[in-house]
Image (cartoon, rainbow, N blue to C red):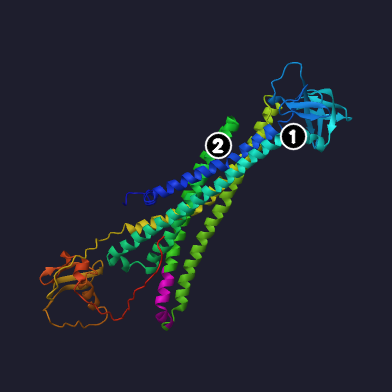
Amino acid sequence: MKSKTTEKRLFHYALNYKKTIMIGIVCLMIAVAMELSGPLIAKKVIDDHIVGVANHYVVTDEQTGAIEFNGEHYIRVERYDSIDDEKVVTLFQDGLSFFLLDEEVPLNARFVEGDGSTFVLEVDQTEVTVSGQTLTTNELFHFFQPEVSSIAAWLGLYLGLILASSVFLYYKTYLLQYASNRIIQTMRKDVFSHIQRIPIPYFVDQPAGKIVARVTNDTEAIKELYEKVLEVFTSGFIYMFGIFIALFILDARLAAICLVLLPIMVVWMVVYRKVAGHYNHEIRETNSRINANINESIQGMSIIQAYNQVDRMTGEFENLNRYHYRYQRKMNTFTALTSFNLVDFLRNVAFVAFIMYFGGISLDGTGIVTAGVLYAFVDYLTRLFEPVNQIVSQLAQLEQSRVAGKRVFELLDEEGEEVEAKPITRYDGYVEFDLVSFAYEKDDYVLKDLSFSIQPGETAAFVGHTGSGKSTVMNLLFRFYDPSKGRILIDGKPINELSRQQARSHIGIVLQDPFITGHYHFKYHDE
C-alpha cells in the first residue's frame, strides 16, 4: 500500500461506489448537452427566422407561406423554387430603420442616404441607387409574421430542454453527494478501525489532537474532494468538451485556435500543485498542532493554572497561530495573484482572436459572418470560461484534499496488528518475569534484568518512588508494550505467543483515575 500514490488510493476509495458516480456523470453529460443546445438554437432562430428574412420573391399569385403587402404577394427565397423572371426585393436595415428595396441588395451593403423612395447604398466601395420605400413597425411585422410560429417552436424546444436538464442536474448532484458521503463514511471507519490495531508506543509521541484532526478535519477535507472538487472538475471538462464540439460545428479553424487553452491549463495546474502543495502541507500540519495544543491545554488546565503556566501555553498557541496565519496569507496571495488573473487573461486573448478572425474574413471579402454565428460564438466563448474559472478556483481545495489524503494514508500505513479475540482457557494465575528489560526510549532502561514470580492466589504489591517502573510492569503484563529483552510468562506460556486481546482477556485492571463507561443509543431510520 505504501508504494501507491495518494491520488491512486483516493481513486481506489472512489471505485467502491463507481456505479453511483458513473450514473451521476452520465446525468451530467445529458444535462450539459441539453444546456449547450441553447446557442445553436439561437443561431437557428437569428439566421433563419430573423436576419434571414431579407430577400423575397414577388409572386404573381398567392403561394403557401406567402404574405400580402400593398396588393403584392411576397415569399422568402428559401421557401420557393423560383423562375428566372421573378422579381427579388430586399428588406434592408439601417440602425432602427427598415426599408423595402425594389431589387436584390447584398447584405454587406452600407446605407448612405435616402429620401423615402430613392436610396443610395455603398456596395463594394461603389455607390448604387435603389428605389424602394420606408417601412413602419406595423408594416415590417407583415414580413416576420410567418416566422412567429417557428420561433415559438424553437424557443419552446429550448425551454423544454432546460427543464429536462434541471432534472438531470438534480440527480447528478444527489448521486455525487451520496457517493462522497459514503466514501468518507468508509474511510473514517477504516481509519478508526486501524487506530485500534496500532500498538500503544505509537501514541506516546503523538498528541491526541493530531490524531483526532486526521480522523475528523482531514477526512472532512477529503470529503470536499469527492463532493465538490470532483463535481466541478468533471462537469467543467464535460462542459468544455461539449463547447469545443459546438465551436467546431460553427467554425473549425477558430475552434482549433481555442484548443491552445487546454495545454495552458494543464501546465498551470502542474505549477499550481507544486507551489500550493507546499503551502497547504504547512497549513494542514499547523492546524493539527493547534488542535493538539488546545486538547492538551484543556486536559491539563488545572495543572497549568496551579503552576502559573498560562503565559507559556498562551505563547505556544500564539506562535502556532502566527505560523498558520503566515502560510495562509501566502496561499491567499498566491491564489489571488495568479488564478483569476489567468482566467481573465485567457478570456481577453480569446476575444481578441475572435475579433481578429471574424473581422479579417469580413474585411478581405473571403466570407460573410452571419449574426447567428457571431452570437453563438460569443455565447460559447463566454460559457467556455465559466468552467475554466470554476476549475481554477477549486485548485486550492484540490491541494488541500490531496495533502489531507496524504496525512490520512500516513496514519493508515502505520504498522498495525490483527485483532485476535479467539477465546482461550482461563489462567491459573502463575506470573513470571524472566530477566525482563524495557526502555521507552533507546538504551534508557526503566527496567533492567527484572525477574520475579507470583503464584496463583498470591497478592503482590509493587512499591517504589515515582519513575521506578511500577506502571511499566503492568504495561508489560497487559502487553501495552513488549519487553526489550527477556520473557513474561503466564502459566508457563510466553504472553507474546498470544494476541494482545487474548493476553488481556482474563486480566482485570482498576485504574488510579477511574473512567465510567456508558452506552449511547441512537435511533435512526436507514433509508
Residue in the image at 81% along x and 35% along y = 139
Neighbor class of circle 2 (other Cα within 10 Å; few <14, some 14-19, many 20+) is: many
Residue in the image at 67% along x and 26% along y = 367
x%, y% of residue 236?
Answer: 52, 45
Of the residues under marks 2 and 1, which one precedes in the sequence?
Answer: 1
What residue range appears in magenta? Answer: 292-305
Neighbor class of circle 1 (other Cα within 10 Å; few <14, some 14-19, many 20+) is: few
Examine the residues drawn in magenta and state their main secondary structure: helix
In the image, taking residue 79 as reference, residue 473 lies left or right, namely left
x%, y% of residue 239?
Answer: 53, 42
Residue bearing the label numbered 2: 244
The question of residue 302 being in magenta is answered with yes
Name the quadrant of the C terminus.
bottom left
* Residue ranking furthest to the top: 84
In the displayed structure, 35 sits above or below 439; it is above
x%, y% of residue 495?
Answer: 16, 68
Which of pointers 2 and 1 indicates the residue nearer the eye? 1
In the image, taking residue 149 as reference, residue 187 lies left or right, namely left
Residue bearing the label numbered 1: 144
For the residue pair 135 and 123, the one nearer the viewer reads as 135
Residue type for callout 2: Phe
The question of residue 4 being in magenta is answered with no
